[in-house]
Structure formats: structure tokens, C-alpha cells
Amino acid sequence: MDISQFSGFLAFLFVFTAGFWLLIFLLTFVVPYWITGTVIENIKLKMQAKKQK
């Protein structure tokens, strides 16, 4: 394995692991935050509509 193959392998490992950790971050923090915010906003809108009636 010469230096160009080794650097390509290191680049592949970096991209693969960066994508893996980004996916973990999105699934554990961003998606639940987004869903929770949507639910809270819908509850507030329903309460406002109920008050206006």
C-alpha cells in the first residue's frame, strides 16, 4: 500500500465516520427537538382556537 492509497483510505474513513456521527446526532437530538416543537406549537394553536370560540 503506497501513500496515495493510504491517504485515500484515510479520507474514506474520515467521511464514513463523520457521516456516522452526524446521523447519530440527527437521530438523538435534532429529530426529537423538531417533533417536540411541532407538538407544542400545535397544542398552543388549538388552545388559542378554543379561546376564540
Image (spheres, rainbow, N blue to C red):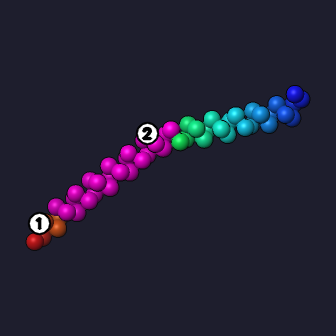
Identify the residue under disc 1.
51
Q: Which mark is residue 20?
A: none
Q: CA distance from mark 2 to mark 1?
A: 35 Å
Identify the residue under disc 2.
28
Marks 2, 1: nearer the viewer: 2
Most common secondary structure along the magenta stretch: helix
Q: Is residue 25 above or below residue 34?
A: above
Q: Nearer the viewer, residue 27 or 53?
A: 27
Q: Residue at x 32, y 55 (%)?
A: 38
Q: Residue at x 74, y 37 (%)?
A: 11
- Residue 46 in percent (x, y) is at 19, 63
The magenta-colored residue range is 24-47
Q: Nearer the viewer, residue 13 or 44?
A: 13
29 inside magenta stretch: yes
Question: For the residue labelled by badge 1, is the local secondary structure a helix, a strand or a loop?
Answer: helix
- Residue 10 in percent (x, y) is at 75, 32
> Which quadrant of the view contains residue 19?
top right
Number of numbered discs: 2
Instruction: Estimate how packed mark 2 is, as few (under 14), some (14 to 19) or many (20 or more) residues with alpha carbons within 10 Å.
Output: few
**Image quadrant for the C terminus?**
bottom left
Instruction: Estimate how packed mark 1 is, as few (under 14), some (14 to 19) or many (20 or more) residues with alpha carbons within 10 Å.
Output: few
